[in-house]
Image: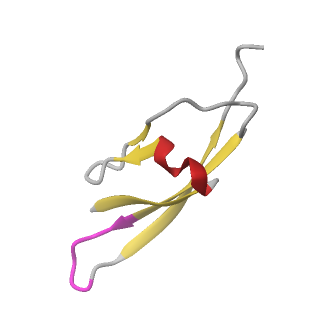
Amino acid sequence: FTYSLVSSVPVAKRDLFSIDTKTGEIRLMGALDFEDNRLHELQIEARDKGTPPLSGHCSVELEVLDVND
């Protein structure tokens, strides 16, 4: 399988997340601000190496909690 980040909401924050194409592990690449956006939705695609290749999709929701205030 190979994994890819298809889209995220908001699109301007797409560079905040990365995904390992072999394991599907999602990593945070920057700081998230509770006041800026409290919820991020990532669309993930998994594709096999068959002929023809088949794919599946899932949605990952990330809720940002405000722990500083």
Number of marks in picture: 0
Question: Along the horizontal axis of the image, is 59 left or right of 24?
Answer: right
The verdict on residue 66 being magenta is: no
The verdict on residue 49 being magenta is: yes
| Residue 52: % across, % down | 26, 85
Q: Residue at x 66, y 30 (%)?
A: 33
Q: How is the image coloured?
A: secondary structure
| Residue 20: % across, % down | 31, 47
**Above-or-below relation of 56 to 3:** below
Residue 9 appears in the picture as rendered: no
**Above-or-below relation of 56 to 61:** below
Of 47 and 28, which appears nearest the observer? Answer: 28
**Above-or-below relation of 3 to 64:** below
Q: Which residues are magenta?
A: 46-52
Q: Quadrant of residue 38?
A: top right
Of 60 and 27, which appears nearest the observer? Answer: 27
